[in-house]
Amino acid sequence: MNFFKLRRFFGAAKDYSSVISGHSKAHPILLYSRSDSQQSARAKSLLSEHKLSPFVIEIDKEEDPKSFREALKEATNLTRIPIIFVRGKPIGGLGDLRKKLKNGEIQSELKDK
C-alpha cells in the first residue's frame, strides 16, 4: 500500500472516530446498524418493544462504510453489527442488548441521568 492510500485510510478512520465520539455523546441510545442485517433489525425491534428510541446510523449508507467499521472496531473492540451505545458507552451487540434490557440495566442507566 502506498503512502497516499495509507494517509487516506487513516485519515478517514480518524474522521469517523470523531463522528462516533460525537454521536455517542449526543444521543442517549445510539445504534450502529446495517440496513441488510437481521440482527440490526432485531435490535431495533427490541428497543421499540421497550419504548426506547435509538439514534440509528446505517453504516452501509455512509460514504466509506469500510473505514467507518474500522473506526467502530477501534473505538469499541467490537466487530459484529449491531453495536449499541448507552449514555456514551458501548454496551455490545444484540446479545448484550437482550440481556441488559431483560435485567433492567439499560432502563436504569437512562433514568439515572
Image (spheres, grey):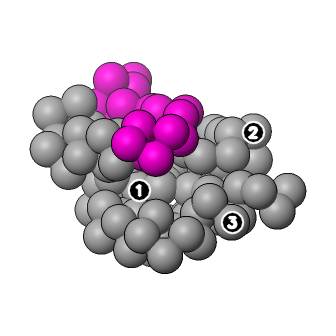
Region of the chain picked out in magenta, as a range:
47-66
Residue 36 locus on image (x, y percent): 15, 33
Q: Secondary structure at mark 3?
A: helix
Quadrant (top left/top right/bottom left/bottom right) for the N terminus: bottom left
**Tag 3: residue type?**
Ser
Residue 92 versus residue 52 in the image, above or below: below
**Tag 1: residue type?**
Ile
The residue that mark 3 highlights is 108
Residue 105 got which mark?
none
Numbered disc in front, either 3 or 1: 3
Instruction: State the separation of the CA atoms marked 2 and 3.
Output: 19 Å
Residue 4 visible (yes or no): no
Task: Report the residue at 85% width, 56% height from top.
Answer: 113
Instruction: State the separation of the CA atoms marked 3 and 1.
Output: 19 Å
The residue that mark 1 highlights is 83
Q: Which of these two is toward me, 12 or 44?
A: 44
Q: Which of these two is toward me, 51 or 15?
A: 51
Of callouts 2 and 1, the N-terminal one: 2
**Tag 2: residue type?**
Ala
Q: Which of these two is toward me, 41 or 65?
A: 41
Left or right: 28, with 51 as reference point: right
Instruction: State which quadrant residue 64 falls in.
Output: top left
Residue 42 versus residue 112 in the image, above or below: above
Q: Secondary structure at mark 1?
A: strand
Q: Secondary structure at mark 2?
A: helix
Instruction: State which quadrant residue 34 falls in.
Output: top left
Residue 25 visible (yes or no): yes
The residue that mark 2 highlights is 26
Of callouts 2 and 3, the N-terminal one: 2
